[in-house]
Image (spheres, rainbow, N blue to C red):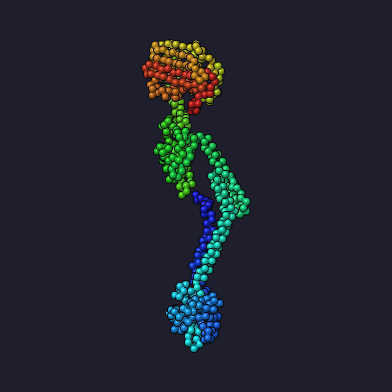
């Protein structure tokens, strides 16, 4: 930016030329003066010649008088040197030489003024006198002598007098220059006080406004500058209003961007990040400040880079879905639009990002769920239909076969019933059915009831169930859904019996753990077949079975553990499992003692 303002030493600059012009004019005059003096002196001399010639003519005619005497008188009267010369150059009289010494004077015929006068009637010259040694201006004129011979009257004025005049003139000129200098100085000071100083103040104030250190300029007393100051203040006020409006808009935009759940990244025409909102930092797990950095360095994902490149090249909105592996597997939906505004019309881009992991997961789950439910329903239905058709086609006539087939139909119906019950339980837990009702639930009683309900199944499988209920500290009743909690325990206990070995053991432990607000811990351990580590992450998914054949044989629906997880989460708790293949498994459920909102990771209903 160009700096405004006048450097102080230049403030008087416009006045210096005036001073210099005066000095130059004076110097010019100083050098012109000798010529001027000489021409003035010659004009004066010729004037004097014109006046003196008739007088001298008369004197010359009077031969009784001595020219050497009256010449002196004439010189004294006129203040000039007067010389009378014969046509052959012999000096007859000279006012500056003693009469007695005139005869000894040099012949003047070769004097330039004499020669000129002899040639043209009059002549002049400026030179040093050989007689007196001084510099003179000479003027000569011919006149007729008493006997008709040619005489020359010569007048001379010493230039020294004129030099003295020149000195006086020089002093006067110096005085004039000095006076002009003083005048200029006074004018400068006045201008400085009236114009430059207030102007400098205005400029300083304007700079302070620009730097945000001041709001307005001081209005000076001087009328000319007051108008300028008022105009500046008006400008400052308008600029302030506009800045304020822009600032407000920018703050609003920032707030909007900060509160958005979508990640937003603005890329400048140079490929650098102009703006990144907090959600974007979170989505891409970015730590630190990445503003101003090249975008391709911030997000090193080929899909992301391609999206930006396509948007910048095509100048049209683009979208893409990318998968991120770190910090966890996630699906992101990107939508980008071109952003114009580069100085040379270059394009930038704005990218909006949404985490669609959950949406994609729910959509996949819904698809899987429908497929699974259809499959689970199809198998018993096909069996029932097969048995019914066989009965219709004649098996009814054989009472033993008819009884066997009817039993099988009943068994398939029970399986269907169980499946429907489990689906309903899941649906109820997910809020489709009436919400979970909370009431104090005595977990000890629930445990004992579940053991009692499954004691026959355990006996049939030759599995021994042990209950360890820790009395100290006692587990208080927890706020919960008694049916849901009973379902949870029945499912865990049922699995522990089903996937056990003959003569195996099941241990059911109920204890209190002191976490933040206290927790009830239910542990169901078995000595069964165990679960391979790779199956553990999927164990709680609907219809997931480790060994499909065995699970079907055991008559499971594949929904038992999904229900366990849902019940635990609906109570604000969680479930985990430890298992070793061939050695057994331990399922551990932790439930908060106080009323707690459901655990947030509860997935949406796929129903
Ligand atoms: P299912 O009705 O098939 O038992 P679950 O959801 O209850 O369905 O269990 C899912 C799968 O987890 C089972 O099919 C089984 O393979 C495995 N599983 C559950 N509990 C145990 C356990 N205690 N020991 C071994 N495997 C188990």
Q: Is residue 141 visible?
A: no
Please give the name of the residue rendered at 49% of the width and 80% of the height, measured from the top-left corner: 93
State the residue in front, 439 or 248. Answer: 248
Given the current orientation, which residue lies at the most extreme left position? 582
Point out residue 593 in the picture as x, y percentages from the top left corner.
Answer: 52, 18
Please give the name of the residue rendered at 41% of the width and 31% of the height, measured from the top-left corner: 326
Please give the name of the residue rendered at 52% of the width and 54% of the height, measured from the top-left corner: 10
Number of callouts: 0
Tell me which corner region of the image, top left, top right, bottom left or bottom right, holds residue 532. top left
Tell me which corner region of the image, top left, top right, bottom left or bottom right, holds residue 213. top right
Residue 568, compared with residue 8, is above or below; it is above
Residue 238, compared with residue 279, is above or below; it is below
State the residue in front, 278 or 322. Answer: 278
Q: Is residue 67 visible?
A: yes
Point out residue 371 in the picture as x, y percentages from the top left corner.
Answer: 44, 28
Please give the name of the residue rendered at 48% of the width and 12% of the height, measured from the top-left corner: 470
Given the current orientation, which residue lies at the most extreme bottom position? 147
Taking the image in four quarters, ligand 1 sits in the one at top left
State the residue in front, 376 or 347. Answer: 347
Point out residue 88 in the picture as x, y percentages from the top left corner.
Answer: 44, 84
Point out residue 300 in the picture as x, y percentages from the top left corner.
Answer: 40, 37
């Amino acid at each position: 930016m160009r700096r405004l303002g006048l450097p102080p030493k230049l403030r008087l600059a416009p006045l210096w030329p005036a001073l210099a012009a005066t000095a130059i004019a004076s110097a010019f005059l100083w050098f012109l003066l000798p010529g001027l003096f000489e021409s003035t002196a010659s004009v004066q001399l010729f004037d004097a010649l014109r006046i003196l010639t008739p007088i001298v003519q008369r004197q010359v005619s009077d031969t009784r008088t001595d020219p050497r005497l009256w010449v002196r008188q004439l010189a004294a009267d006129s203040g000039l040197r007067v010389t009378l010369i014969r046509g052959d150059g012999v000096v007859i009289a000279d006012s500056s030489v003693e009469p007695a010494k005139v005869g000894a004077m040099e012949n003047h015929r070769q004097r330039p003024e004499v020669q000129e006068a002899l040639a043209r009637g009059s002549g002049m010259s400026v030179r040093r006198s050989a007689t007196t040694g001084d510099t003179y201006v000479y003027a000569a004129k011919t006149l007729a002598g008493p006997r008709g011979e040619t005489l020359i009257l010569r007048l001379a004025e010493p230039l020294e007098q004129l030099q003295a005049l020149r000195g006086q003139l020089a002093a006067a000129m110096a005085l004039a220059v000095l006076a002009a200098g003083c005048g200029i100085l006074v004018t400068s000071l006045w201008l400085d006080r009236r114009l430059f100083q207030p102007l400098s103040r205005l400029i300083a104030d304007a700079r302070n406004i620009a730097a945000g250190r001041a709001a307005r300029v001081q209005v000076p007393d001087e009328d000319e500058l007051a108008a300028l100051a008022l105009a500046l203040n008006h400008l400052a006020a308008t600029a302030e209003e506009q800045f304020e409006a822009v600032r407000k808009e920018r703050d609003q935009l920032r707030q909007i961007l900060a509160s958005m759940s979508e990640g937003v990244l603005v890329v400048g025409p140079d490929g650098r990040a102009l703006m990144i909102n907090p959600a974007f930092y979170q989505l891409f797990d970015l730590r630190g400040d990445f503003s101003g950095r090249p975008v391709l360095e911030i997000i090193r994902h080929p899909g992301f880079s391609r999206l930006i490149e396509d948007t910048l090249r095509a100048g049209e909105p683009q979208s893409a879905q990318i998968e991120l592996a770190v910090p966890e597997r996630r699906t992101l939906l990107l939508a980008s639009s071109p952003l114009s505004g580069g100085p040379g019309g270059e394009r930038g881009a704005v990218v909006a990002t949404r985490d669609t992991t959950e949406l994609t997961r729910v959509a996949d789950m819904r698809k899987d769920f429908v497929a699974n439910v259809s499959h689970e329903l199809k198998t018993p239905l096909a069996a029932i239909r097969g048995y019914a058709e066989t009965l219709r086609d004649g098996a009814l006539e054989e009472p033993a076969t008819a009884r066997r087939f009817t039993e099988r139909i009943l068994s398939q119906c029970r399986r269907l019933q169980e499946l429907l019950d489990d689906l309903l339980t899941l649906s109820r837990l997910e809020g489709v059915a009436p919400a979970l009702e909370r009431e104090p639930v005595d977990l000890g009683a629930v445990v004992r009831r579940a053991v009692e309900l499954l004691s026959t199944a355990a006996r049939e499988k030759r599995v021994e169930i042990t209950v360890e209920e820790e009395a100290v500290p006692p587990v208080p009743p927890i706020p919960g859904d008694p049916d849901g909690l009973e379902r949870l325990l029945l499912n865990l206990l049922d699995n522990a019996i089903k996937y056990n070995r003959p003569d195996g053991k099941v241990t059911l432990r109920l204890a209190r753990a002191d976490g933040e607000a206290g927790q009830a811990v239910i542990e169901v351990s078995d000595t069964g077949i165990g679960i391979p580590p790779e199956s553990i992450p999927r164990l709680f998914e609907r219809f997931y079975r480790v060994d499909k054949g065995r699970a079907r044989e055991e008559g499971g629906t594949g929904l038992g553990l999904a229900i366990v997880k849902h019940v635990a989460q609906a109570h604000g708790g969680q479930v985990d499992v430890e298992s070793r293949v061939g050695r057994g498994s331990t399922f551990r459920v932790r439930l908060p003692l106080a009323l707690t909102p459901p655990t947030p990771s509860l997935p949406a209903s796929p129903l």
